[in-house]
């Protein structure tokens, strides 16, 4: 009951003309970002984060989260109309979405996609409403050992579930190294500044993510020479209504996609894995499974429901524990720090307006977002017909302005370009960016928790196994961190036995 009252309080916070305006602006910007292939949610949020510097934290998080929701909705537009996934989690949508568009059923596919996204998001937001406060209350009893164990488990989960262990570890180490630059938060001494006054405050998180996500993506897109040729979409009230009448018979696909999305939202790379898992399960258990890939409506519903659900669920660990569940959540977490808020369980105690305003905005923005994308698809799809040679310079200028305004320093522009090149190399060599960002955001907090725990125990590492909770998290983290090595050793052992 208390959560429901808090939610109503959140609606009272969010229902002002200014916040509603920021919501609409965020959704429209998100849809624009989402229809540009490759740019996607994390890049869009990183590039547009400087726009929020003069806003209140609540208005800022509403606008940024709406950019993310808008990009999640719009990722399906390019997948269905152009057979080009807007983001990695939209790849599975192309399997049946584009064939439907070729059959002249683009409006039906888009309606099913947007409605599935809305349902997945609604399921995850309900989960956040009732589960996040419980998690936060539990985490209030955490001390430095418990917080270090949570951070360690998060980093280990990236290693244990990553596609390439070595590349994931290298990305994490680079992020940790960058987080060390500047002032030591425990002793107050300077580290790795090499006499440069510009590095006294460390490497700015926002400048790094603008370079890694925004500039790097432009470089990759320029190299690939993007050219868009697609199918025209026609959506009207009749198409929407006729599609909605078909959806109830797919209730099991919708429900399973929402559950998979909510569960996978806690994990690294959750949205992409969730969309493929949901598509695979729908194909396996559908009576039309053999027709998947030829234009099945169920094949569009399943991945989009799971992907949007996962994107929303990733905010639960970010708000309750200060641990981002996705790359976009990591950028939003950095935004919280820039606005002077401390992510974690105390957020629910000290910043109730912010937390419940965000939760309320998630309900409202997904409803508004659904309406916007249903009735403006042809308009936004037309953006893809603008030559990329015009769009690219505009995005680079927006990135440069955003980086400069962080400290009004030309130094930031050079740092942004440097990390643009690093991001380009990472993408070409298939190194993951999310672990680097995570280590950069949480590196300082992890180090402080570790040193406080060690100081409190007078140097005894046994403090990390001093009770069942911290011991269980550390054991799970160690298991995940060493699981790739154990799997490799087990494989070689089986090969030796076979000989």
Image (cartoon, helix red, strand yellow):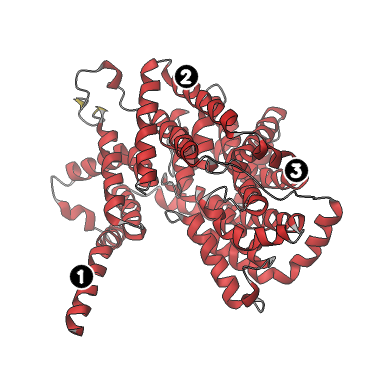
| Percent x, y of residue 389 | 56, 30
Which residue does the image show at 22% across and 45% down from the upper left? Answer: 453
Q: Earlier in the sequence, mark 2 or mark 3?
A: 3
Q: Which quadrant of the rendered structure holds the C terminus?
A: bottom left
Residue topped by disc 1: 489
Does residue 355 lie above or below 82 as drawn? Answer: above
- Residue at the far right in the pictured view: 238
| Percent x, y of residue 414 | 36, 22
| Horizontal side, residue 26 vs residue 398: left or right | right
Give yes or no for contact between labels 2 and 1 (Cβ–Cβ under 8 Å).
no
Give yes or no for contact between labels 2 and 3 (Cβ–Cβ under 8 Å).
no
Q: Which quadrant of the rendered structure holds the N terminus?
A: bottom right
Q: Is mark 1 on a helix, strand or loop?
A: helix
Disc 1 packing (10 Å; few <14; some 14–19; many ≥20): few
User: How far is disc 2 from disc 1 in space, using C-alphas?
Assistant: 50 Å
Of tags 2 and 1, which is closer to the observer?
1
Give yes or no for contact between labels 1 and 3 (Cβ–Cβ under 8 Å).
no
Does residue 76 lie above or below 494 as drawn? Answer: above
| Percent x, y of residue 154 | 35, 52
| Horizontal side, residue 363 vs residue 424: left or right | right
Q: Which of marks 1 and 3 is nearer the N terminus?
A: 3
User: How far is disc 1 from disc 3 in space, using C-alphas?
Assistant: 54 Å
Q: Earlier in the sequence, mark 2 or mark 1?
A: 2
Q: Which mark is residue 378?
A: 3
Residue topped by disc 2: 405
């Amino acid at each position: 009951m208390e959560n429901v009252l808090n939610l109503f309080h959140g609606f009272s916070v969010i229902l002002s003309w200014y916040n509603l305006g920021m919501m609409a602006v965020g959704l429209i910007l998100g849809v624009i970002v989402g229809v540009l292939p490759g740019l996607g949610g994390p890049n869009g949020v990183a590039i547009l984060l400087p726009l929020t510097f003069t806003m209140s934290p609540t208005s800022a998080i509403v606008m940024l989260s709406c950019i993310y929701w808008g990009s999640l909705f719009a990722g399906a537009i390019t997948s269905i109309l152009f057979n080009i996934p807007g983001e990695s989690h939209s790849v599975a949508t192309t399997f049946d979405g584009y064939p439907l568009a070729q059959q002249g059923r683009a409006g039906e596919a888009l309606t099913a996609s947007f409605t599935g996204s809305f349902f997945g998001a609604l399921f995850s937001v309900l989960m956040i409403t009732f589960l996040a406060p419980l998690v936060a209350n539990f985490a209030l009893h955490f001390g430095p050992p418990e917080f270090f164990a949570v951070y360690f488990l998060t980093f280990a989960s990236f290693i244990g579930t990553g596609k390439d262990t070595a590349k994931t570890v290298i990305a994490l180490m680079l992020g940790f190294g960058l987080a060390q630059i500047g002032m030591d938060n425990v002793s107050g001494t300077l580290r790795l500044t090499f006499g440069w006054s510009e590095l006294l405050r460390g490497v700015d998180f926002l400048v790094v993510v603008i370079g890694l996500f925004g500039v790097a993506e432009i470089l990759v897109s320029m190299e690939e020479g993007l050219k868009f040729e697609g199918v025209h979409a026609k959506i009207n009230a009749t198409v929407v209504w006729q599609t909605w009448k078909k959806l109830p018979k797919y209730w099991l696909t919708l429900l399973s996609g929402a559950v998979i999305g909510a569960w996978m939202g806690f994990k690294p790379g959750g949205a992409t894995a969730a969309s493929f898992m949901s598509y695979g399960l729908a194909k396996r258990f559908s009576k039309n499974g053999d027709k998947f890939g030829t234009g099945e409506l169920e094949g569009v519903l399943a991945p989009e429901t799971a992907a949007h659900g996962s994107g929303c669920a990733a905010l639960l660990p970010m708000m309750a524990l200060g641990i981002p569940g996705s790359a976009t959540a990591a950028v939003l977490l950095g935004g919280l720090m820039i606005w002077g808020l401390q992510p974690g369980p105390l957020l629910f105690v000290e910043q109730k307006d912010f937390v419940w305003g965000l939760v309320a905005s998630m309900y409202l923005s997904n409803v508004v977002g659904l309406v916007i994308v249903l009735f403006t698809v042809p308009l936004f799809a037309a953006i893809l017909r603008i030559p990329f040679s015009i769009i690219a310079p505009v995005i680079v200028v927006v990135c440069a302005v955003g980086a400069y305004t962080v400290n009004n320093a030309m130094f930031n522009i050079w740092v942004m370009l440097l990390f643009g090149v690093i991001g380009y190399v990472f993408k070409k060599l298939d190194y993951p960016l999310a672990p680097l960002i995570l280590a950069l955001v949480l590196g300082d907090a992890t180090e402080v928790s570790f040193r406080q725990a060690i100081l409190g125990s007078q140097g005894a590492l046994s403090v990390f196994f001093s009770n069942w909770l911290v011991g269980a998290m550390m054991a799970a983290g160690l298991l995940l961190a060493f699981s790739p090595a154990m799997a490799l050793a087990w494989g070689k052992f089986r090969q030796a036995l076979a000989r």
